[in-house]
Image (tube, rainbow, N blue to C red):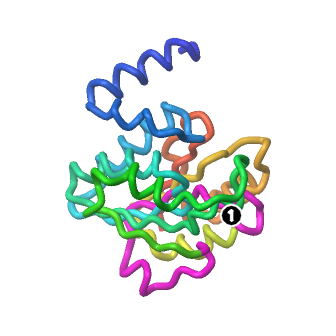
C-alpha cells in the first residue's frame, strides 16, 4: 500500500471512530500512530489500566483515553510538563495538557515528576498497556523500560514512540526487549512499535 493510500485509509478510520476532533491538538506522533494508540487501547480488557510516560500537551493521551473509554479504562500520565527534552524548548505545558485532555479528566491520573521517580505507589498495580515516549536518550529509554516492564501483565503491551534512526536509543532498547524473549512484536506503525509481553 502506498503512503498516500495508507493516509487515506487512516483518515477514513479516524472519522469512522469519531475521533477526528482530537486531531486538532498538536502532536509529534503522526495521525496513523495516534489511530494505532486508539485501536490498541480500545481492545484492552475491561477496566484496563494504562500508563503514558511523556504526555507533552496531551494529544496521544486523548487517543489512548478515547480507546480506554470503550473498556472503562484509566490512564496514568507521567511528565514534568516542563518540556525539557522537546525540540520546541523548555516551558511549562501543564495547563495546556489539562485543557486539551479535559474531556477525559475523570479517566486520567496526572503524576508531575520525572519518570525515573515514579514508584509502585504511583502506579497502584499491574498495567495492561504502557506507552514510552519520554526522553529518547538511550539511558533514559532503558531506565523507563526497566521501570515499567515489571508492571505490565503477561499479555499486556508496551509501545515505544520514535523507533527511528534519529533516535538510536529507542531502537537499541527496543532490540534489547525483543532479545530478552519476554516480548514479541505486535505491530509497527511508522515509528510507533508495539510489543506484547509473553512471559
Residues packed near mark 1 inside 10 Å, few (<14), some (14 to 19) or many (20 plus): many
The one of 157 and 86 positioned closer to us in this rendering: 86
Element class at badge 1:
helix
Q: In which quarter of the image is residue 106?
A: bottom left
Measured along the vertical axis of the image, is residue 25 above or below residue 20?
below
The reply, left or right, for residue 163 in relation to residue 185 is: right
Whether residue 114 is situated above or below residue 161 in the rendered picture: below
Identify the residue at image location x=45%, y=58%. Answer: 157
Q: Residue at x 53, y 71 (%)?
A: 148
Q: Is residue 161 placed above or below 14 in the rendered structure? A: below
Is 56 placed above or below 49 here? above
Residue 102: quadrant of the picture: bottom left
Residue at mark 1: 141
**Image coordinates for residue 197, horizontal then vertical, percent:** 48, 62
Q: Tell which of 183 and 146 is nearer to you.
A: 146
- Residue 152: x percent and y percent? 44, 69
Check if residue 139 falls in the magenta segment. Answer: yes
Q: Position of residue 99 (x, y in %)?
A: 39, 53
Give the residue at x 46% y 73%.
Answer: 111
- Write down the quadrant of residue 182 in the picture: bottom right
User: x, y percentage for residue 108?
Assistant: 34, 64
Q: Is-magenta flag for residue 43?
A: no
Give the mark count: 1
Instruction: Write the start and end of the magenta stretch as one range.
Output: 114-140
Q: Which residue shows up at 35% across the image and 50% down it?
A: 41
Amino acid at each position: 500500500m502506498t503512503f498516500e493510500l495508507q493516509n487515506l485509509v487512516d483518515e477514513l478510520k479516524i472519522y469512522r471512530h469519531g475521533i477526528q476532533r482530537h486531531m486538532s491538538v498538536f502532536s509529534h506522533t503522526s495521525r496513523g500512530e495516534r489511530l494505532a494508540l486508539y485501536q490498541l487501547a480500545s481492545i484492552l480488557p475491561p477496566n484496563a489500566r494504562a500508563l503514558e510516560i511523556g504526555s507533552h500537551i496531551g494529544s496521544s493521551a486523548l487517543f489512548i483515553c478515547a480507546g480506554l473509554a470503550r473498556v472503562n479504562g484509566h490512564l496514568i500520565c507521567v511528565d514534568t510538563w516542563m518540556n525539557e527534552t522537546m525540540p520546541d524548548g523548555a516551558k511549562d505545558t501543564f495547563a495546556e495538557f489539562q485543557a486539551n485532555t479535559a474531556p477525559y479528566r475523570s479517566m486520567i491520573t496526572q503524576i508531575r515528576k520525572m519518570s525515573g521517580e515514579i514508584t509502585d505507589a504511583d502506579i497502584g498495580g499491574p498495567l495492561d498497556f504502557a506507552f514510552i515516549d519520554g526522553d529518547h536518550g538511550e539511558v533514559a529509554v532503558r531506565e523507563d523500560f526497566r521501570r515499567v516492564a515489571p508492571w505490565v501483565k503477561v499479555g499486556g503491551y508496551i509501545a515505544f514512540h520514535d523507533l527511528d534512526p534519529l533516535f538510536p536509543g529507542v531502537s537499541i532498547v527496543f532490540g534489547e526487549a525483543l532479545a530478552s524473549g519476554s516480548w514479541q512484536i505486535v505491530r509497527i506503525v511508522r515509528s510507533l512499535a508495539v510489543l506484547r509481553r509473553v512471559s
